[in-house]
Amino acid sequence: MIVLSLTEAIANWAVSFMEMTGYFSVTILMALESMIAPVPSEAVMPFAGFLVEQGKFTWTGVIFFSTLGSIIGSLISYYVGSLGGRALVLRFGKYLLLDKHHLDLTENYFNKKGDITIFISRFIPVVRHLISIPAGIAKMNIWKFSLYTIIGAGLWNAFLTWVGYILKDHWDALLKSQWKHLMDVFFVGIIVLIFGYFVYKLIQDKKKRSANN
């Protein structure tokens, strides 16, 4: 009986799921990543790179559909900010673990750096999930917003795909090395942190509601 490590099991599942659903899953996941949903591109695009290395996806297809997802999600967030404003975002964002503090930081960052923030933010964790909202609130020119998003997201998605492509060449050797168990500990740690953060947010929300009553 072959026992897979946690890392290997997660990777196999992610690659199989992406292979089965094709570019559709790449588009949807990257659309969610560009909104306030907690879907990091670092956990999506490298596996698309695996499939490129295996010849099941193409570079053109992955970059096109991932960037398509990024612009779709970003435009949705833009119009949420533009039409609904900050109040709407804060009201419903809590269901997706939106942290008001992070939104404040993102807004300040956008106001300080200006439109170019839309491009720069694609390479910054957390900020890239939220940056479209203050752009919408500020009524940034939609064509400039779209252009910066497409260029920034395209470069970032291509880089992560390349990382996965290179990693796949060494994947089997890596899983047989001494790093195998360390990777399992890392993944377990990430899962525990996400779960702990979710519980923390629920408790904080409950305290705030109690204080307001």
Image (cartoon, grey):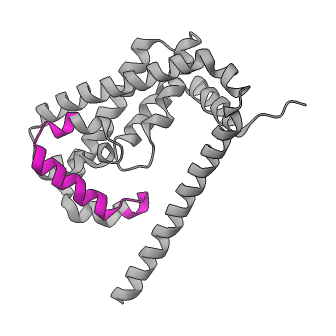
Looking at the image, which residue sits at the far front? 178
Spot occupied by residue 22 in the image (x, y as percentages of width and height): 53, 23
**Residue 15 in view in this figure:** yes
Spot occupied by residue 179 in the image (x, y as percentages of width and height): 66, 33
Locate residue 191 relative to residue 201 in the image: left or right. Answer: right
Quadrant of the image containing the N terminus = top right
Looking at the image, which residue sits at the far right? 1
Locate residue 144 relative to residue 124 in the image: left or right. Answer: left
Residue range in magenta is: 94-119
**Residue 65 in view in this figure:** no
Location of residue 143 (image quadrant): top left
Location of residue 168 (image quadrant): top right
Q: In front: 21, or 209?
A: 209
Check residue 95 for magenta coloring: yes
Up the image or down, 7 lies above or below 48; here it is below
Q: In front: 158, or 55?
A: 158
Spot occupied by residue 185 in the image (x, y as percentages of width and height): 65, 46
Up the image or down, 179 lies above or below 196; here it is above
Kindly identify the residue that appears in the image at 36 percent across and 32 percent down: 69
Spot occupied by residue 11 in the image (x, y as percentages of width and height): 63, 31
